[in-house]
Image: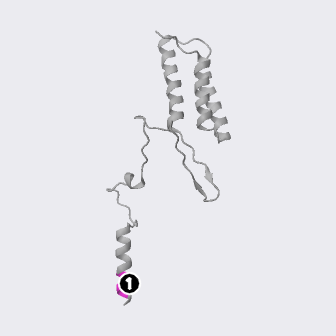
Amino acid sequence: MAPHPSPSALYRTVLLACRAAFRNDAPTYAASKLEVRAQFLAKGHAPLPPHEYERAAADAHEAASFLKTMVVQAPLNPESNAYELRLEPHHANARGNIKPTLAEDVVDEDYDCEGCTTSSSTSTASSTSATTKE
């Protein structure tokens, strides 16, 4: 059986994941460090029973893994005034691959939006108005 990582090693693991996830966002990085510290201090300084320690260690590893693979920050490009998303190889879903989600993939066909127009209804409306002007 492998030895359990020390609390300080777990703490460092989560802090390193925070630093990687928020490397270009100082306020968020500072807030994440405070939250990680608060979570570790909430466990107290007394040794935890083995089953609780295993759960706490798993939680720390899960948090670090989530930060590394699921958090992507998109910096603002001042030239285009748009946020640029840069995916890196470590940003992956649970299956280990990256599949972009397109807006049309998440459209709910059953949603009835009053006042919403689709491209087909817009073209119909414009052709109708053009016909009535003749």
* Residue 27 screen position, x and y as percent: 67, 40
Image quadrant where residue 112 sits: bottom left
Q: Which residue is found at the position 49% from the left and 27% from the top?
A: 62
**Residue at numbered disc 1:** 130
* Residue 100 screen position, x and y as percent: 43, 47
Q: Residue furthest front?
A: 89
- Residue 105 visible? The answer is yes
Residue 129 sits inside the magenta stretch: yes
Q: Which residue is found at the position 35% from the left and 57% from the top?
A: 111
Camera-nearest residue between 71 and 114: 71
* Residue 23 screen position, x and y as percent: 64, 38
Q: Residue furthest bottom?
A: 134
Q: Which residue is found at the position 53% from the left and 40% from the top?
A: 88
| Label 1: which secondary element | helix
* Residue 19 screen position, x and y as percent: 63, 33
Badge 1: residue crowd in 10 Å (few <14, some 14–19, many ≥20): few
Give the magenta-colored segment's residue range.
128-132
Image quadrant where residue 38 sits: top right
Q: Which image quarter holds the C terminus?
A: bottom left
Instruction: Identify the main secondary structure in magenta.
Output: helix
- Residue 42 visible? The answer is no
